[in-house]
Image (cartoon, grey):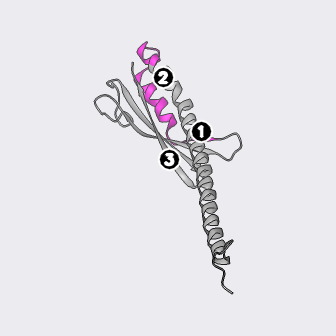
């Protein structure tokens, strides 16, 4: 006997709805995972930038010391060179940050690492920090300007 109107859902309709729902849930779970990954990577990048800033901060004092004649431009250059290939180990001995002076030029674009003073301020120093991110080795670059 055939009924004129059907009440409820067929098994196929229920299975299709369950599959569509499951695919939606998988998409949400994947998005959450990518978000956590991005947050963790950004945290590591922020820590690397903080390490570089803390190590570059004394260069601002040194630039002032050059301006008042307390140190020479050569001594300032030595302070920059001391940052090259410097490795900083984190408190948990897990995070290692390696600094490299990527560029150090004066206002005339003279490479101050390979040229003796005098220099034409301001000096622009680019530090690269290598660190281990969530998905492998990462590098971030920070730029500093020093004048006297």
Magenta span includes 65? yes
Magenta span includes 46? no
Residue receiving disc 1 = 47
Is 31 located above or below residue 92 in the figure? Answer: below
Q: Nearer the viewer, residue 6 or 98?
A: 6
Q: Secondary structure at mark 3?
A: strand
Which mark is drawn over residue 60? 2
Quarter of the N terminus within the rendering: bottom right
Which mark is drawn over residue 1? none
Picture coordinates of residue 78, whole percent (x, y):
46, 30
Q: Nearer the viewer, residue 54 or 3?
A: 3
Whichever of labels 2 and 3 marks the residue nearer the N terminus, that label is 2
Please tell me whether mark 2 or mark 3 is closer to you in this view: 3
Q: Using the numbered discs, state the Cα–Cα distance from disc 1 to disc 3 in whole angstroms.
A: 12 Å
Picture coordinates of residue 8, whole percent (x, y):
69, 71
Is 11 located above or below residue 124 in the figure? Answer: below
What span is in magenta?
64-89
Q: Nearer the viewer, residue 101 or 24?
A: 24
Quarter of the C terminus within the rendering: top left
């Amino acid at each position: 006997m055939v009924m004129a109107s059907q009440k409820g859902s067929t098994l196929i309709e229920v299975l299709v709805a369950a599959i569509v729902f499951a695919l939606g849930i998988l998409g949400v779970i994947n998005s959450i995972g990518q978000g956590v990954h991005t947050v963790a990577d950004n945290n590591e990048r922020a820590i690397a930038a903080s390490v570089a800033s803390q190590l570059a901060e004394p260069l601002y004092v040194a630039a002032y010391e050059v301006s008042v004649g307390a140190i020479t431009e050569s001594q300032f250059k030595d302070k920059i060179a001391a940052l090259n290939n410097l490795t900083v180990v984190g408190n948990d001995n897990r995070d290692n940050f390696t600094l490299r002076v990527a560029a150090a030029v004066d206002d005339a674009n003279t490479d101050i690492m390979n040229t003796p003073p005098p220099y034409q301020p301001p000096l622009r120093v680019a530090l690269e920090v290598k660190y281990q991110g969530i998905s492998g080795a990462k590098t971030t670059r920070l730029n500093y300007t020093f004048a006297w």
